[in-house]
Amino acid sequence: MIYSLFIQFYFIISTRFAPRKLDMGLKEEILRRRTFGIVSHPDAGKTTLTEKLLLFGGAIHVAGAVKSNKIKKGATSDFMEIERQRGISVATSVMGFEFNGYKVNILDTPGHQDFQEDTFRTLTAVDSVIIVVDAAKGVEPQTEKLMSVCRSRKTPVIVFVNKMDRPADDTFDLLDDIEKQLLIKVRPLSWPINNGPDFKGVYNIYDQNLSLFDPSITDIRKGISFSDIQSPELENYIGKDAAVLRDELEILSEVYPAFDIEQYLAGDLAPVFFGSALYNFGVKELLDTFVRIAPSPRAKKAEERLVMVEEETFTGFVFKIHANIDPNHRSRIAFVKICSGKFERNKNYRHIRLGKVFKYSSPTAFMADKKEVIDEAFPGDIIGIPDTGNFVIGDTLTEGEILHYKGIPSFSPEIFRYIENADPMKSKQLAKGVDQLMDEGVAQLFTSQLNGRKIIGTVGALQFEVIEYRLEHEYNAKCRWESLALYKACWIQGDDKAMLEDFKKRKYNKMSKDNHGRDVFMADSSFILDMAQRDFPALRFHFTSEF
Ligand code: G4P
């Protein structure tokens, strides 16, 4: 105890009063890191693109190595499929590889919309995002939602228009559609020659280089490329399309201002690339340009202050927890994003929420399909820390300074059920299971003010199956659901204490507490919610848990 107090005291003193010199090695490590997420509407080609990027990075050697994390409807029931996926997704949660001197970390996101909260949380740990759009379908609803999260966080976004080997709209129209639907200015950095059966290649505007498409050649290095598209020789390969390409590039340079990297880094402009992930086309252009323009890790806001990434002392936060993958071992892995300084194995770090100091003897790094214990890691890296229940999503680790990283909100749930114990002998197991699943962020737990009953709220219906199945298989507990027709739960706040109390009294039977003891209003319908907002104008109704 005395030892631990001494260490904490030492940390506080050393962090506050002894600024250390910047380690150049650290700065270089930061500058070469690219940590990003690939997101898309299901089926646009996220898995295929990820796989091709890993192939280019030499992280895998054969196609098919990355298992789709899609939940496929069919022979197996959904939750069995989810269990299978959970096993896969631990391995593919983070895929790191080296490419041209850059350390690339791809963070995987679940495709199924019932798991979009997972995706939103993962987006808090990325420094940029690649959005995959299906050329034939254009921007789809889930893509719009994901874009709105990126927009609100000012995350730099690149758009990859995939499946150009299939018939698609005119390229200028496609760009207009993307701009309108995603509500962001776009700037093409590659340009396709036709699409569908006439698709002939992609011109890399950034590098001024043209690669010609041949579906029978999957190794891009063996394809034909031109560095000068004015060359008459181009006509020998693509005939009239050469002139069309030159014309289109000219129009393009009139329509779109020159690419401004600062606007991209500020989240105000999305560079667009075209290609066909399936045929490995346009992917190299994307990756080559991506590593050069995408941001390295940047400063991150904590409640207390802005933490600069090149500060020498380590800080990081937990954005994801994977639990009980192997039911025989109660193991969990907490995924920590390193925000500043160097993380070292077996060094003492302070777990801020618990106010305790721990050291971690087997932190792992993820390299595509394998993971290995590492001695050190740098900002932008994601490490997996084996955990026995000490972590919840959002926890901060530091070398001693009291910091709380912000930005892992829970969203207002939309589907609700009362959870009941179906086996009175197992009430302890049920309580523990529910607690741990909530720590993992599977769903949110509320307690009704009226009757003390426990309510589980989720954004997708599948979570109820997941909870029931996991409670039974991992905690040996049984639950029963009772449906509850509610529209939305929202967090209530107000500076006008009298009005807040009046609201809580009048809505007594619809008030609950969340897991942190905060007031939550469970609205029956959008009409009732609108009325409440109108009748109590001085109150604030929050639709995410972070305010
Ligand atoms: P997702 O992760 O975004 O959900 O998409 P995924 O990569 O799994 O791709 C969805 C489907 O689209 C797959 O076909 C995949 O082969 C196909 N696809 C991906 N990129 C391209 C492309 O550039 N061109 C064409 N023509 N198709 C593409 P599937 O039949 O659903 O799956 P599978 O049986 O091939 O795995």
Image (cartoon, grey):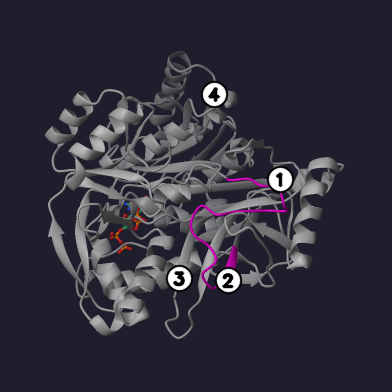
Residue tagged 2: 386
Ligand 1 is in which quadrant of the figure? bottom left
| 4 and 3 marks in contact (CB < 8 Å) | no
SS at circle 2: strand
The Cα atoms of the two marked residues, 4 and 1, are separated by 21 Å
Q: Mark number for residue 263?
A: 4
Outermost residue, top direction?
254
SS at circle 4: helix
Dot 2 or dot 1: first in sequence order is 1
Is label 3 within 8 A of ligand 1 (CB to nearest ligand atom)?
no
Name above or below for residue 351 compared with residue 331.
Answer: above
Dot 3 or dot 2: first in sequence order is 3
Q: Is residue 144 magenta?
A: no
Q: Mark number for residue 323?
A: 3
Coordinates of residue 67 in the picture (x, y in percent) = 41, 67
Q: Look at 61% across and 46% down and name the residue there.
A: 34
Name above or below for residue 174 compared with residue 463.
Answer: above
> Which amino acid does the dot numbered 2 rest on?
Pro
Coordinates of residue 367 in the picture (x, y in percent) = 60, 64
